[in-house]
Image: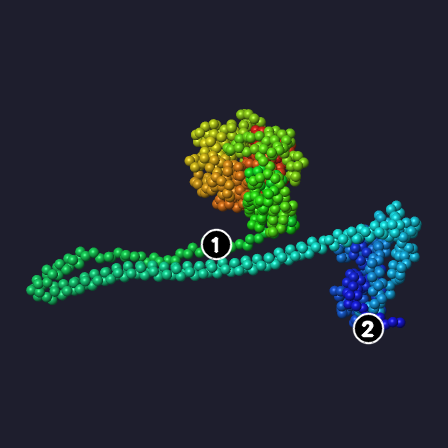
Amino acid sequence: MARREPASPVVRQIDQQFLVCSICLDRYRNPKVLPCLHTFCESPPRPLPVPLSTPPSVLAPLSCVHTVHLSICLAGCLPATAPPQCLQNYIPAQSLSLSCPVCRQTSILPERGVPALPNNFFITNLMEVLQRDPDPRGAPPVPLPPLGAATGQPLCCPNHEGKVMEFYCETCETAMCRECTEGERREHRDHHTVPLRDVLEQHKAALQHQLDAVRARLPQLAAAVGLVAEISRQLGQRRAEAEAEIGSSFEELEVALRQRREVLLRDLEATCAAKQQVLEAQLEVLRQGQESILSSCAFTEQALHHGSATEVLLVQKQMGERLRELAARPFPEHPHENAQLEFRAEPEGLRRSIQNLGSLLTTSATAHTTVATGEGLRQAVVGQPCSLSVTTKDKDGALVRSGGARLRFAVTGPDGATAETEVQDNRNGTYELVYTPRAEGDFVLSILLYGQPVRGSPFRARALRPGDVPPSPEEAKRRVKSPGGGHVRQKALRRPASMYGSAKRKENPIEDELIFRVGSRGREKGEFTNLQGISTSSAGRIVVADSNNQCVQVFSNEGQFRLRFGVRGRSPGQLQRPTGVSVDTNGDIIVADYDNRWVSVFSPEGKFKTKLGAGRLMGPKGVAVDRNGHIIVVDNKACCVFIFQPNGKLVARFGSRGTAERQFAGPHFVAVNNKNEIVVTDFHNHSVKVYNAEGEFLFKFGSHGEGNGQFNAPTGVAVDSNGNIIVADWGNSRIQVFDSAGSFLSYINTAADPLYGPQGLALTSDGHVVVADSGNHCFKAYRYLQ
């Protein structure tokens, strides 16, 4: 018999990596393949015989972390406590399903259990081939049952001994013998079966196709590996750069502190020296005068007590003049300087500044999950700014709440020229992108986040001339005058269904419904003419500013009329176009009087108490009360916000006309959230802006349009207990809901009774949304799910 060569390293590696069961950690015995394509032994091997000379201590059961089937653990441990385990013993008795020990995928067991699972002929044949080499561990090869495939004979059915597998069950996707289809206990009755040879080439082709598809992913994975590795390298580089910048910044601060210390010490020395010089000069004068008086007094006394008559007469004139001169001489008896010399650093503010000095700017946004929305992705008008919104998301698709991401926006025209672009960071994870096409044609919009294209980028948009933009029949518009001045486009009156009640607009709506509707056009109690602001109280009241009727009406949370007060006029206590309304913690009703240019305060019963803002306000529109009891007034004409104490003293004012962060264009209404932050609707800038209690800008959201999160002149605003912001979208005749960071959540479903030009809105004490439906001269209550 020829001498066998030792197994090659490649053979050993194949044996160790592919031919070892992950349950018993030994070579496969009758390998069975699960639907998830993992393979295991059908049953555990027989334990090796233990020599009689084995010491009892070795046979004693001890704990071992290795799951093995030998009486002695192959890792060198003492006998393991677990019995031999393989697929047959792994599955609980009477179980109808099995969970893969590797991937935990659950599948249905065949009727005959584990033995009926498909054999892994590839593993079996590979073991047959490798059996020709000696076992890499030096042990004799384990004898395997003869395989027909390895010897060129047909494969036998594992369920019917000696029966050749010549059929294929397409239902069960497995090979079988004739007995499996025709026997008394046939498992594949009523299944569609075909000869094995008829489907062999088909399955080989399918496998080859899948193989080619998987292999085609390798270049993509290689590119992804390179990209991720490069980002990881850049991250390390940015860390080193940031660390160097932090060190440099604080070193500069240390130098500045030392320099300031030296300046202060020099100033201290110079100031002290100057004061000392003045005091020393004064001391010198005082001491000289003191010495002159003492010497003159001593000389005169000596002459008076010890001098002769002749001597006294001789010095009398001279000493008399001397004494008179000393008595009349002015001396600097009051100090010419003071001893104050203190150091006042006020370090608390500096300490707070140092504690907040610097910040690490980063986000978790990823390009492949970030989305861009807006009409500007599809169509633009030549010469007019066109906007779109980008919402950044992390790898899991969750909204990113912070700004500062590196976003690049480029627009290329049909002639290859780039259009003017602008990126506005709303500081809440959303960005407004604006571009202005200068010519007709197709434009390519490229949006890159950290150098990678966002989902769908690049986009293609067509720029048309203003006269070529086709009107949408469903969205026919007419010019109407804004209630705060100026013009914006608004939806047509009384459509059969609201714009967001259609299938197109009813994307992710909150499924709320109309609870009640109060009012119609008129001048009687419970009737309105162009109602504007609306507010609620904890006492269960709804307060409405009936603007053109120059009055305020009060209702219960159920819509029952309770009270009406106010008469037309320009005297204190009278109303001349009331717009905004709010209720403070005492139940007092605060009314913004647009034409009288002041804010009036009434008792809960409607009795006039005081007015504030006269001489300062130009056109007060919205009012609110913050947690400190301050009255916040939005001045629509002056485009600013005033903050007053209840006694009328001005606390702060911020804002001016314009489009910047601290500017407004016809601001309308205001609300205060649970953080005491001020939320203002910026009507003609088509956005909502949020400020802290001192008027410092925090963030804004929204842009001009009709998509989710866009506005066509926002008006009323309210904030729920969770911080979600509810906004009345006047020009689009709808109500939108945003989270506390300004990310769009959904609509209030108003399809049951469509709105027309909603103005103020508020949340009742029982959690409903009430909105002033100005165009329909009524107010409505909708169920709101928080």
The image quarter containing residue 490 is top right
What residue does disc 1 label?
353
- Please indicate whether residue 246 sits to the left or right of residue 216 in the image: left
Q: Which of 574 and 475 is in front in this view?
A: 475
The vertical placement of 570 against 142, above or below, is: above
The image quarter containing residue 705 is top right
> Of marks 2 and 1, which one's residue comes earlier in the chain?
2
Q: Which of 186 and 309 is in front in this view?
A: 186
Locate residue 121, reporting x and y percent: 84, 58
For the residue carrying disc 2, how many other residues have a C-alpha within 10 Å: few (<14), some (14-19), or many (20+)? few
What residue does disc 2 label?
54
Tell me, yes or no, whether the two marked residues, 2 and 1, touch with CB atoms within 8 Å.
no
The vertical placement of 414 against 361, above or below, is: above
Image depth: mark 2 or mark 1 in front? 1
Locate residue 478, reporting x and y percent: 57, 30
For the residue carrying disc 1, how many other residues have a C-alpha within 10 Å: few (<14), some (14-19), or many (20+)? few
Q: Residue at x 39, y 60 (%)?
A: 263
Q: Residue at x 10, y 63 (%)?
A: 315
Report, in whole angstroms, how far the alpha carbon at label 2 lies from the one at label 1. 77 Å
The vertical placement of 169 against 74, above or below, is: above
Locate residue 232, reporting x and y percent: 62, 57
Q: What residue type is labelled 1?
A: Ser
Task: Say the numbered circle drawn on residue 522.
Answer: none
Asked which secondary structure carries label 1, the reply is: helix
Q: What residue type is labelled 2?
A: Thr
Q: Which of 473 and 543 is in front in this view?
A: 473
Q: Nearer the viewer, residue 638 or 356?
A: 638
Asked which secondary structure carries label 2, the reply is: loop
- The answer, for residue 363, to whether it is visible in the render is yes
Q: Which residue lies furthest to the left in this view?
A: 310
From the image, which quarter does the N terminus lie in? bottom right
Q: How many marks?
A: 2
